[in-house]
Image (tube, helix red, strand yellow):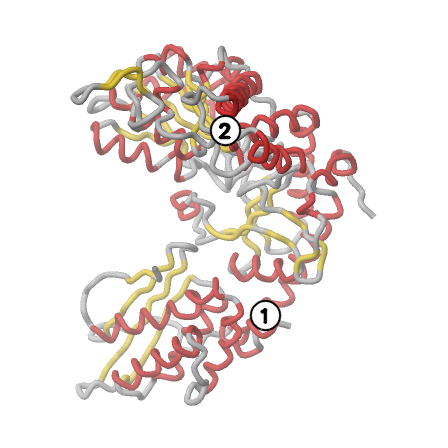
Amino acid sequence: MDFDELYQAIILDHSKRPRNRGTLPPPATHGSGFNPACGDEVTVFVRQSPEGRIDELAFESQACAICTASTSLMTTQVKGKSREQALALQRRFIDFLTKNTPEEGLGNLRALGGVKKFPQRLKCATLGWHALEVALSEADRGPVTSE
Amino acid sequence: MIVNLPGLADRYRADFPILAQDVNGHPLVYLDNAASTQRPTAVIEELARYYREDHANVHRGLHTLSSRATALYEKARERAAQYLNAERPESIVFTRGTTEAINLVAASWAERLKSGDGILLTEMEHHANLIPWQIVAKRTGAKLHFIPVEGDGEVDWSQLEKYFREHPIRLVALTHISNSLGCVNPVSEVCRVAKKHGAVTLIDAAQSAGHSTLDVRAIGCDFLALSGHKCCGPTGIGILYGRPELLNEMEPYQYGGEMIVSVSFENAQWKPPPYRFEAGTPHIAGAIGLAKAFDYLDRVGRPAIEESDHYFGRTTADRLREIPGLRLLGPKGDRAGILSFQLGTIHAHDLVAFADQQGIALRGGHHCNQPLTRKLGLIATARASFYFYNTVSEIDRLVTVLRAAIKYFGE
């Protein structure tokens, strides 16, 4: 059934028990994503090494299961990666959801493939990833929206 | 088995062909009526009949079809005036909906407000009855005052006089039935107090137009706004009722064809109300379809619809309160059939998606009521809203799906 494909066990697991939940103090940078359609909000905190490697991540969310799970899965996937690797994974993940590109290299992010059949939930699955991008850019440009 | 104490669904549900379908393999349970109701066959067929037989532009053609279309359009205005017990048909301005009706008053009547003048609203207003006044306040220097919503959705109306004593309130704009709390506000009493203090009143009747008897003179309001699609009519048509004396002294809101007496290269003179406020070709079919919807609702009987609405409100509230971890918004006692709630820690969008898989249409979000949702410490709520064609067994389906969702998303 499509619905159980959307809410796979791993999604429900990460939404009920999010990994890396919390905040990181400065000098960690953070970025927020806001979905005006539903009011969902995600803030991602990133601590980078001088070489630009992501040493530590945390996130806070007031969001649906898809959004929280996608952000939680993201934190487990990008830890230890360089900024460029993380952004490349973000692009690959979004292309997988929007352009139906192959799932190779996505690991357990594949579990979010059910979103493809529920395009109205696409923003839920990508909000945390946009927040990550803001956190990595270190630029103080305020919260991004999903619009 | 359909058990339905109000009895209206037994008689009238079959008039709504869209309800007789399966969604995701289950019989549709349509509980998003506060967003938009469905249309009876009578309205759907009248729209088709009008386009098939009578359509032309109104007020400008000398030919037969234009005369027919004009007569039907103006008859729709008369029907609307009768539906609202307005003084005369000229008190009825056709708009795109409640939002445009309120914007019209904000852009035209509110021009006379001055710095320091008070606009009194409640904290439960829909964005459509909030943002236009925010803009008026910024433009004129008028000040917004809010009657607070206490607890999970109660208003202490006994404090009403206080606002008028403490502030120079010139306008009171409030919703009749709240689209998020489901409470029915004492609009007649508010208008009486406002009038005593010389303030103009605007009632947002979007949620009450198809749910209760609306008598603008009994309410005593100066303006009243409603949307056709929330009372069995077409989308894209609505009404602004305005007391004739007020409409007469208001400037147009938009300019163009249809609303002028004469035009030179430099100047133009406006027609009297309501035409002054209906620039351009109006939604002719929409107005005609809306009149048909009013005929239909009066055939069902608005007192009966109101009774069934309150029955669904009370009964569903009692059933929802039995569900562990469910936080129901709105008044504790009597209420309309609009129920917003938070179920444990389940996000409204997950819940709405889950219910949809069982064929149940709910709304999830802030219901265009973001400041109130935030004040209540919530991000989004799920909302079930009923109409007279709903059945008691549909309350059972709702309760069953909510209990199943707790299992599905719970720990």
> Which percent across, then down, holds residue B57?
45, 28
B185 up-or-down from B152: above or below:
above
Pointer 2 local density, CA inside 10 Å: few below 14, some 14–19, many at least 20: many
Q: State which quadrant residue B58 falls in.
A: top left
Q: Chain of mark 1?
A: B
> Which percent across, then down, holds residue B60?
40, 22
Does B386 sit left or right of B63 as displayed? Answer: right
Please give the name of the residue rendered at 51% of the width and 28% of the height, measured from the top-left corner.
B287
Q: State which quadrant residue B303 falls in.
A: top right
Please give the name of the residue rendered at 34% of the width and 21% of the height, measured from the top-left corner.
B259
Q: Is residue B203 visible?
A: no
Please give the name of the residue rendered at 32% of the width and 30% of the height, measured from the top-left corner.
B145
> Which percent across, then down, holds residue A22?
37, 71
Q: Which mark is residue A98?
A: none
Q: Which residue is mark 1?
A: B411
Q: Which quadrant is home to the C terminus of chain B?
A: bottom right
Please give the name of the residue rendered at 64% of the width and 72% of the height, measured from the top-left corner.
A1
Q: Which mark is residue B205?
A: 2
